[in-house]
Amino acid sequence: MNKKRVSPLTGGNVITIPKNKRSVKMAEFGHASTANYKKTFFEAHPDLEGKVIVHHTVEQQVLTRYPGIVTEEEMHSLENLRGIPHELNSDLHLSRIRKEWNRFYKENQRVTKDQLLKKATEIDEKYTHLYKPPKEWKL
Amino acid sequence: MKFYILEPEVAGGPGADTEMDATVHPPRVHKLHYELDGWMGDDLLESFPCYIVTERLMLELGKRGFSGCEFGNVEITKSEQFADLYVGKNISEFRWLKVNGEAGTDDLGISDDNMLVVSERVLKILSQFQSDHCDVEEYVELLAASG
């Protein structure tokens, strides 16, 4: 099948993604002591409370789609949480990130934890310029 | 007739009440609970392997009698993230768009790589609705050269 991109149906939004030559540090999981992920994030970054939308870089729905691969403690760990400032069209960026994960789900019936973290790292590389705090770069 | 591959807005994912058999691919969904994490406003939404449409789009698609689809009920809820993004935002009524047609033949179908493929006439209807976040590509089926 040959695919040729045509256009968004009615205009659409263009997001500029910087072409970084550096790579971000590989995504990883830690171990959360609570499922209250916002509490975990804002305890670590109290200055960002009310300023960012907190999201899971490996999406929570992975728990439903691929049961047994990631634990709740890993899912809600600080290492898996990212903040996107409200003023940076956070809803638009989160929408693009969800679409990327959706493609991943289409392509992968079964996954390993490493595959999930690799995909999360790819997404981090595209969007890290938006994150607060920024994701660490690989040395 | 021309056909197109669509990648609709993904506004969320399967909620806790979804009944899904993930031992097959694409997963077989018996009951759909779509939890919204954010909604940019498009009338057609996806969360693999399911599609949902606003009631107004369902009515328009339904009266045209397009092949390859039927409609069902869907439970819609808003996640914690949705509440953080949009304070008091109202959401439309949605219906489950069950696509069961053959890609490139029926008006709505699913390709071998799990993409939604629609006919030109379906695309024309969709373009009259909110669809800013739906990506479109032309669908070209290459016939394998024989012998």
Image (spheres, rainbow, N blue to C red):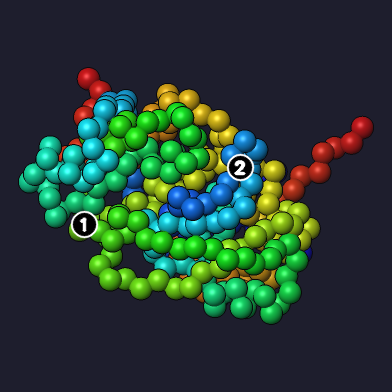
Q: Position of residue B52 (x, y in %)?
A: 55, 63
**Residue labelled with disc 2:** B21
Which residue is pictured at 51% across the width and 29% down the height?
A111
Q: Which of pointers 1 and 2 indicates the residue nearer the eye?
A: 2
Q: Which residue is mark 1?
A: A86
Q: Is residue A21 left or right of residue A39?
A: right
How many residues crowd mark 2 within 10 Å: few (<14), some (14–19), many (20+)?
Answer: few
Image x and y of residue A132, in percent? 18, 43
At x 54% / y 75%, what residue is drawn?
A: B55
* Residue A33 against residue A99 in the figure, above or below: above
Q: Nearer the viewer, residue B62 or A37?
A: A37
Give the label on residue B61, or none.
none
Quadrant of image for the C terminus of chain A:
top left
Query: Which quadrant of the view contains residue A108?
Result: top right
- Residue sitting at 50 percent across and 40 percent down? A65
Name the quadrant of the N terminus of chain A: top right
Q: Quadrant of residue B38?
A: bottom left
**Mark 1 element type:** helix
In this view, the residue farthest toward the left is: A47
Query: What amino acid is found at the position of numbered circle 2 in the picture?
Result: Asp
Disc 1: host chain: A
Q: CA distance from mark 1 to mark 2?
A: 36 Å
Is residue A108 found left or right of A128 in the rendered image? Answer: right
Give the chain of mark 2. Answer: B
The answer to whether dots 1 and 2 both sit on one chain is no
In x, y percent, where is residue B109? 70, 56
Q: Residue at x 43, y 38 (%)?
A: A63
Q: Is residue B30 above or below residue A74?
A: below
